[in-house]
Amino acid sequence: MRWQPPPELVAAVAPGLLRLLGLTWRTERLHHDRYQAVAGPRVVLFWHEMLLPLLWLHRGEGVAVVVSQARDGRYLSLSASRLGYLPIAGSSTRGGVQAMKGVVRALEAGRTVALAPDGPAGPRRVLKAAILQAAQRTGAVVQVVVASARHCRRLASWDRFMVPMPGTRVRAGYSLTVPIAPGPEGLAEAERWVRGTFDTLEEETAWRGAAKSTD
């Protein structure tokens, strides 16, 4: 039987390790003014594999994040709390109704809510659109964020989780925001926009002429 560390132990160690790693990164943000300009409720979407650098870049901002009720989610929940995030328990596979209620409450309070629409267990980069319904219901705008690293290691996980190497350059890109129009047509248009925006931002933030990852 494989030993699994208690969530409290991981939460005590993981933020410090991320701090040690993150302080070595040379970071830049494309269109960060788009992110800073938003004053009201907002849903921020990112692919699950990009979680680590984004956790570092947005620490201490009070962003609400949706985390799984599984053990890995409890690790993330406690660690994120220590980095200045507000965890919302639940996911598309476990506690989904509970999570959406928490998302709606956070948005109605004017918060930024961030989550990976392909998490917590994939399929990789397949959009689960329930979060868009919460944004539509509350009148929140939607924003896409991506992150890339000039050199990184990809884990052998379902999402090929990205761990930027010490000292590497890390780049984040931010989209414009859009509201979601009423009805099924509004949701369908928002889904198309999210997919296309992910592709556009990834092209903008990609590193040219350098090996980006090792397995």
Image (cartoon, grey):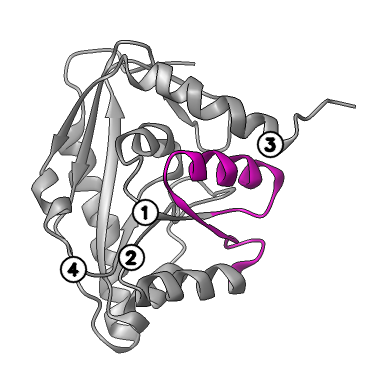
Assess disc 4: are there few (<14), some (14-19) or many (≥20) residues with their C-alpha within 10 Å of its C-alpha: some
Residue topped by disc 2: 111
Q: Secondary structure at mark 3?
A: helix
Dot 1 or dot 2, earlier in sequence: 1
The amino acid sitting under disc 1 is Val
Identify the mark at residue 63; answer none if there is no mark.
1
Residue 199 vs residue 155: left or right?
A: left
Assess disc 1: are there few (<14), some (14-19) or many (≥20) residues with their C-alpha within 10 Å of its C-alpha: some
Q: Is residue 184 above or below residue 27?
A: below
The spot of residue 177 in percent (x, y) is: 17, 63
Q: Is residue 121 above or below residue 94?
A: above
The amino acid sitting under disc 4 is Val
| The magenta stretch spans residue 42 | no
The spot of residue 12 in percent (x, y) is: 60, 29
Residue topped by disc 4: 178
Residue topped by disc 3: 8
Q: Secondary structure at mark 1?
A: loop
**Do the residues under discs 4 and 1 have CB atoms within 8 angstroms?**
no
**Do the residues under discs 1 and 2 have CB atoms within 8 angstroms?**
yes
Dot 2 or dot 4, earlier in sequence: 2
Q: Is residue 141 above or below residue 160?
A: below
Dot 1 or dot 3, earlier in sequence: 3
| The magenta stretch spans residue 72 | yes
Q: How far apart are the two marked residues, 1 and 2, measured between alpha carbons?
A: 7 Å
Foreground disc of the pair 3, 4: 3
Q: How far apart are the two marked residues, 4 and 1, measured between alpha carbons?
A: 19 Å
Dot 3 or dot 2, earlier in sequence: 3
Q: Residue at x 18, y 37 (%)?
A: 203
Location of the N terminus (image quadrant): top right
